[in-house]
Each structure stands twice: as structure tokens, then as C-alpha cells.
Image (tube, rainbow, N blue to C red):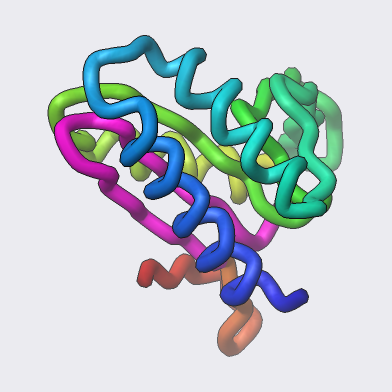
Amino acid sequence: MEDEVLTKKIIGLAYKVHNTLGIGFLEKVYENALKIELEEAGLAVKQQEPINVYYAGRLVGEYYADLWVENRVIIELKAVRALDRMHEVQLVNYLAATGMNTGLLLNFGPSVQVKRKFREYKSGQVVFRQD
């Protein structure tokens, strides 16, 4: 399953979780519920999995992904009124530092907010595309 198809499936399940639980829960509740939905959909999911972060080829720390699906998509979850630009920057930094190419920022606020980020290589440079 390519990353764009996979992220669409994840987003659909996020809406299912939000429609079932509604608003007002802590982030961890939505994280746990989404993990259940992803697993029931037959996807491999790791929760709070440490991912090594490198700088100049050296390990400088670990990032704990809220959810990591199929070893290809990092999901950063929020449960806030509205996403802030810093939430997007956080996800892009995680992608850049870990070498992962696809990330989802999902907010379970008053309505589901989704930011989908793809790391691409163009003319020898790394760029991030958002859908």
C-alpha cells in the first residue's frame, strides 16, 4: 500500500474515532482508540515507539512517536482547540530527524483536523509537501 493510500485509510479511521468518542477527551484516549481501529483494519501499529534521531550521522536522542503505522507513517496526535503552526513544524522536524518520509498530524479537537506531510527529494534537496 503506497503512503498516500495508507494515510487516507488512517484519516478515515481517525474520523471514525472522533465520531464515536466526540470531543473533550485527553490526547491519550484518542491515541488508544485509534490504535485499536488501525489494528482492527489489519495494519501494523507501534505506540510510543522510540525512534532514533540523528544529527551529522550521530545519534542525538530519541523521539517517541504517538503511533507509527506499517513502519512508514509517523502519526502525531493532538487534542486541542486548533492546530498551531508549531505542531506542523514539530512533525516536519520529526520526519527530517528520523529520515521518515510520511507523517500525519491529527487533531481531535472540536472537529478532526489533518495535516499530511510528505518528504520528497527534488534536485538533490529535501522538500516537504503538504496535502
Please give left or right for residue 10 compared with residue 100 in the image. Answer: left
Q: How many marks?
A: 0
Q: Main secondary structure of the magenta part?
A: strand
Q: What span is colored magenta in the figure? A: 100-118
Q: Nearer the viewer, residue 30 or 54?
A: 30
In this rendered view, identify the residue nearer to me: 13 or 94. 13
Which residue does the image show at 61% across and 75% down from the upper left? 5
> Is the residue 48 above or below the residue 67 in the image?
above
For residue 109, which quarter of the picture?
A: top left
The N terminus - image quarter:
bottom right
Q: Nearer the viewer, residue 43 or 120?
A: 43
| Quarter location, residue 56 | top right
Residue located farthest toward the front when viewing the structure as drawn = 20
Q: Is residue 78 left or right of residue 23?
A: right
| Residue 71 x %, y % | 82, 49
Q: Position of residue 39 (x, y in %)?
A: 76, 41
- Please determine whether, in this image, residue 61 is positioned above or below residue 20: above
- Compared with 31, 14 (above or below) is below
Q: Quadrant of the C terminus?
A: bottom left
Q: Is residue 110 left or right of residue 114?
A: left
Q: Quadrant of residue 79?
A: top left
Q: Residue at x 66, y 61 (%)?
A: 101
Magenta highlight on residue 44: no
Is residue 115 in the magenta section? yes
Coordinates of residue 31 in the picture (x, y in percent) = 54, 25
Report whether 84 appears left or right of 73.
Answer: left
